[in-house]
Image (cartoon, helix red, strand yellow):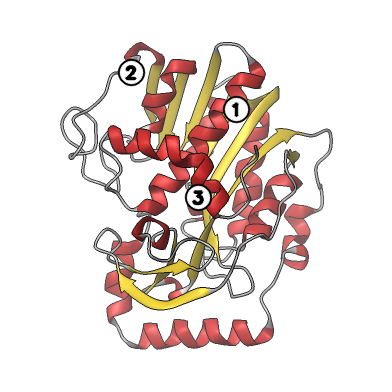
């Protein structure tokens, strides 16, 4: 069965075994936003491994010290590249390289190479078409310097071109990413899922399942703060059992920073295609999906109201790159 593009009750049922694995490994108490994204990638990498039916060479882009690269050593060799692979990451790590509340787990250490480097330099490190699988668990949107110039779609396009060059012709590019809630507004690196997909497909990829705006977008009235995500408000959606705290943490909203943008999660699997949009780099501003006029006004009101409150500039540093 295929996963839906956005989080859904169907996805939670399909991902339950992978979520349980992460819990067993000691990572289940981290914010569920991250656990959910990791579980979608575990599901899709397993499906890719079945289809390729060979020992894999896998590239993790921006995964830091998360558990996925260790878990995936069972499929073959894994190269993890991150500018923070020097033991600095968004959650506390013990001396053995695992999350501090994890007792650790066995993996094939000889199959894992962690490289501390800037993503934009990796084409010089690896041969052309040398990876069977490349995956991104919400790092690629941040490569635009967190969207400070509001050019995240262009940055994603350029990053995807690099991935395209490194991926084998029959390989898989697997993505799980935070995105702005559809029909609201974008801000900085929190772009619409449609625009993330557009940037990737314009770079020479085709999705194995057409991108679908399938989010059940009805918020529950109850809002609660998350200890795991101190910079966010956490909300449940009616499509996901609102009584389940795990579900409630999938959808969230900045209470400081990024103009109070609301965030969802999309997942997609891509294969290389024969064509790419050669005009995207020059014309992307004219072809990306845009918010309505009223939502654009809301975004600016939120942004300026936060900026005026001065606390925004201090607290924003604590909410960036959290997952």
Most foreground residue, 183 or 123: 183
- Nearer to us of marks 2 and 3 is 2
Look at mark 2 in the image and give the residue it sits on: 107
Q: Residue at x 25, y 37 (%)?
A: 26
**Residue 322 percent coordinates (x, y):** 35, 54
Most foreground residue, 198 or 142: 198
**Residue 285 percent coordinates (x, y):** 72, 66
Q: Residue at x 77, y 67 (%)?
A: 286
- In the drawing, does residue 222 fall left or right of residue 44? left
Up-down: is 74 above or below 228? above
Tell me which corner region of the image, top left, top right, bottom left or bottom right, holds residue 275: top right
Screen quadrant of the N terminus: top right
Most foreground residue, 224 or 265: 224
Task: Please tell me how crowded label 3 is: few (under 14), some (14-19), or many (20+) other residues with Cα within 10 Å.
Answer: some
Task: Please tell me how crowded label 1 is: few (under 14), some (14-19), or many (20+) other residues with Cα within 10 Å.
Answer: few
Answer yes or no: is residue 323 visible. Answer: no
Look at mark 3 in the image and give the residue it sits on: 143
Up-down: is 157 above or below 95? below
Q: Earlier in the sequence, mark 2 or mark 1?
A: 1
Disc number at residue 200? none
Q: Residue at x 51, y 66 (%)?
A: 188
Look at mark 1 in the image and give the residue it sits on: 47
Up-down: is 129 above or below 162? above
Q: Earlier in the sequence, mark 2 or mark 3?
A: 2
Most foreground residue, 216 or 184: 216
């Amino acid at each position: 069965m295929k996963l839906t593009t956005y989080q859904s009750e169907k996805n939670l049922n399909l991902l339950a075994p992978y979520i349980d694995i992460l819990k067993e490994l000691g990572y289940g108490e981290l914010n569920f936003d991250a656990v959910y994204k990791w579980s979608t990638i575990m599901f899709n990498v397993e499906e890719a491994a079945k289809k390729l039916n060979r020992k894999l060479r896998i590239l993790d882009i921006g995964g830091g010290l998360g558990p996925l690269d260790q878990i995936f050593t069972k499929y073959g060799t894994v190269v993890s590249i991150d500018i923070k692979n020097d033991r600095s990451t968004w959650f506390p790590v013990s001396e053995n390289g695992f999350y501090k509340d994890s007792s650790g787990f066995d993996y094939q250490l000889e199959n894992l190479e962690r490289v501390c480097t800037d993503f934009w330099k990796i084409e010089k490190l690896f041969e052309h078409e040398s990876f069977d699988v490349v995956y991104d668990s919400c790092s690629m949107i941040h490569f635009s310097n967190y969207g400070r110039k509001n050019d995240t779609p262009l940055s994603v396009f350029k990053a995807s071109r690099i991935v395209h060059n490194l991926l084998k012709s029959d390989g898989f590019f697997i993505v799980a990413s935070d995105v702005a809630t559809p029909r609201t507004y974008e801000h900085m690196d929190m772009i619409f899922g449609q625009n993330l997909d557009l940037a990737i497909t314009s770079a020479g990829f085709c999705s194995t399942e057409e991108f679908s705006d399938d989010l059940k977008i009805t918020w529950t009235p109850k809002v609660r703060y998350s200890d795991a995500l101190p910079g966010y408000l956490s909300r449940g959606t009616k499509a996901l059992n609102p009584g389940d705290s795990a579900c409630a943490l999938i959808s969230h909203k900045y209470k400081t920073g990024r103009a109070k943008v609301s965030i969802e999660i999309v997942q997609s699997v891509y294969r290389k295609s024969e064509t790419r949009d050669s005009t995207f780099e020059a014309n992307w501003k004219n072809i990306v999906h845009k918010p309505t006029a009223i939502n654009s006004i809301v975004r600016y009101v939120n942004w300026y109201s936060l900026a005026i409150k001065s606390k925004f500039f201090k607290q924003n540093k604590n909410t960036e790159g959290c997952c």
